Image: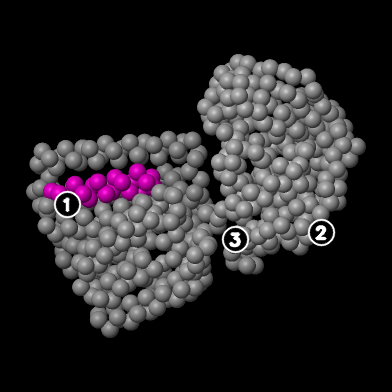
Amino acid sequence: MLSFLVFAYAVLGITSKINKSGSRLLIITFLLLTFNFLDFFELCRGYGLSMAFLTLGFYYLLNYLNNRQPSEFMKTLFALQMALAANLTLAMLVVILTGVLLFFQWRQRLLFNLKVVFVHILNIGLTGFWVKLLLHYKEANLLDSGMGEDYWKVTFLSLLDFLYTSNQMWLQISTIILMALIGTYFFRGMAAFKTIDALFKPSYLFSFLFLLCVLIYFLLKKMAGINYPEDRTGLFLFLLFVLALAYTLEKIPEQLSGLLSVLLIAAISVNSIKSANLKNFGSYFYHTMPKQAYDYLVNEQSKSDTVLTIGGHRIRELNFAFLNYRGNAVLNDMDGSEDMQMCYDYFYALKEEKTYYNQYYDEIMADDWSHVLLKRKQKLKRTLFLEGNKEIEFKGSSTYFDFLAIKDTSLNSCNPLEAEVKLSFTKMPKPFNAFLVFSVGKPDGSGDTCYKYIPLNMLADDLDNKSFTLKLTSSSLPTKLKDLKIHIWNIDAKEVNFKLNYFKIHQLHGDGVNFKIPSNYRYLIERFTQKPVL
């Protein structure tokens, strides 16, 4: 919320430099009334901070281009560095803005000043650090946003959908027309001025920055394989677009400018009124599991003499894991499968999946984001398949600690297996970057038919002198198995000391334990409802 005060201050500061009231209202409406954009100022994420400080940087930049005061120059770079620290996707824009400042100072003979040079060296050094970190993330394949070859679809449609929950054809056409208007008046104006110094006028600066960013990100994808900006990572393009459009309307005929301003302000206002609420985030990325649902499960676990299993989805798993981590991991980890299978005591599902789960689960409670907590109508029955009751101590820095490894075994049915493992930790790394793994090999030995794991660092940051009983549930299996394994994968090969108290493997029985909702069902829901669901 504090970052919103910075943002509002910067927006109002920029609008005070604009002559036409229509353009001023346009900026205020787009930036202060687009509800899904404002979401970021109520989340503990860097996007709201970055947009606040980027806008503040623009405000100080306009001041500096006008009065050339060194204090405005330093405040500009400070704000840009704050924005970059909050959001590394701004690296290219910060590089471009640094270039604009250098070029302006060179043209105005302000560059060769010891203080200016020192500030630039500091700024370039910091920017280089963030760029190096960004490249490290890229090499580690940690930047998966923006994948795809269709620039329009990945960047512009995703941004429209993210901000306005729609990318209908009329909205796409309107966006293209407005972008063409920005480009047309930019190039016409630059040709009329016949001097590069026109770039330093606000009426051309933001159009230049917007068009240049659009071009550069296209070239970076084609020439260097750097992903396009996508939805929330492209928010800076939205900000540049709004400022470029507002200043473009300053240059076009009064009647056309007024008409466009009224239409755009009306459209954004209607969308904001429709989107406004006090409960829901615009993007499903920020939907959370209600605390009361977690508390219900904790209460149910306290009444049970066995560890309860909870099914979900890989996206919902992290929401649950956060609550469980803060609750001292009293519950078993949520299974993060892509497919919903009816073989868990409880399930955190989608309301849209009711057609499938209604026969096997009762609804306990629902949230405002289309999620529902389910409890099996018929309790699962468990028959013992295999167990190991001998307590074993493990020490060392091995990558793998094997608890069970059997080959060429068979089952009486294809029903899922449930592995139960009790671990007592003595001296462990903090945090312990490791997985407890339960895997089942394919009959032909070509890989795993099932690979389930629990990240142990999601249980606690410090595992010393703690014990946990954990369960991992497989999907339906072939009756002939190549191998069956339970082990800990010590990812960083750190020194450990812990005990395996016991393990048990049960086969599950009950109505629907082999029934699975196909993963592509969610995509069908999205296709027909035009809403993302996870």
Where residue 312 sits in the image (x, y, percent)?
Answer: 67, 49
Spatial CA span between label 1 and label 2: 66 Å
Q: Secondary structure at mark 2?
A: loop
Residue range (magenta): 70-90
Tell me what residue is drawn at x 16 percent, y 37 percent: 118
In the image, is residue 71 part of the stretch drawn in magenta?
Answer: yes
Where residue 225 sits in the image (x, y, percent)?
Answer: 45, 44
Give the residue furthest to the bottom.
255
Q: Secondary structure at mark 1?
A: helix
Spatial CA span between label 2 and label 3: 22 Å
Lateral position of residue 11 relative to residue 409, left or right? left
Lateral position of residue 396 relative to residue 122, left or right? right
Q: Nearer the viewer, residue 393 or 104?
A: 393
Q: Mark 1 and mark 3 in contact (Cβ < 8 Å)?
A: no
Tell me what residue is drawn at x 64 percent, y 58 percent: 371
Q: Report the amino acid beneath label 1.
A: Glu
Q: On residue 72, which mark appears?
A: 1
